[in-house]
Image (spheres, rainbow, N blue to C red):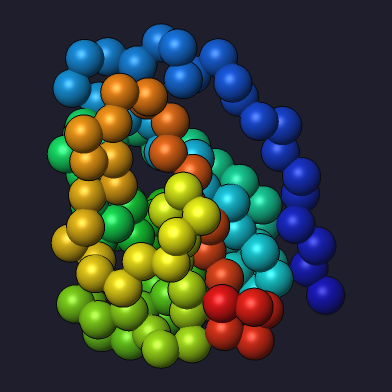
Amino acid sequence: MTLCNPSPIDNTAAGWTVRGELDVRIFMFGIICQVTGERQTTLRLRQDATVRDVVSALGDRYGAAFLGLVMRTASRKASHSAIAVDGYIVQDLDQPVAPARTAATVEIILLTGHEGG
């Protein structure tokens, strides 16, 4: 069984974003954590990034095994996975992760259904 390596949270990134960019902190649990080998990571994306952009960037980083857990197809989230942005479950992958938000850090939690998602 692979255990996730706990990573320290980098709070310094939030205060140093470039105008037009957004730091997105992602927290992963259970099998997703085992596939990625990490409990959390940070992405720097465009300010207008959507949930789909986040999942795509994570897929680029972690590969097909990650995408297979989160997505049913390239355009549809798997029914057993849950993606929460700022504590709210997201159904629409085209939802911006930070609409009209001034803070530069958004937290996204990825769970699979049997883990509470």
Q: Is residue 24 left or right of residue 8?
A: left
* Above or below, 19 relative to 82: above
Q: Name the residue located 45 percent from the left edge and 60 percent from the top edge.
A: 88
**Residue at the extreme top of the image, as rendered:** 16
Instruction: Report if residue 78 is visible in the image.
Output: yes
| Residue drawn at (80%, 62%) of the image | 3
Quadrant into which the N terminus falls: bottom right
Query: Taking 30 as reference, is 18 above or below it?
Result: above
Answer left or right for 13 relative to 7: left
Q: Residue at x 64, y 78 (%)?
A: 116
Residue 2: give x, y in percent of width and height: 78, 68
Quarter assignment of residue 41: top right
Q: Please tell me which residue is depicted at 42% across the width and 80% down the height of the picture.
A: 68
Residue 9, compared with residue 34, is above or below; it is: above
Q: Position of residue 50 (x, y in %)?
A: 22, 52
Most foreground residue, 89 or 115: 89
- Work out whether residue 73 or residue 62 is closer to the camera in this orientation and state it: 73
Whether residue 63 is visible? no
> Quick check: 61 left or right of 53?
right
Q: Estimate the x, y position of residue 49 in percent, counting from the top left.
A: 21, 44
Is residue 19 positioned above or below 98 on the image?
above
Q: Closest to the observer: 84 or 19?
A: 84
Screen quadrant of the C terminus: bottom right
Q: In terms of image quadrants, where is residue 18?
A: top left
Number of marks in the rendered image: 0
Residue 27 lies, in percent from the top left, at: 58, 51
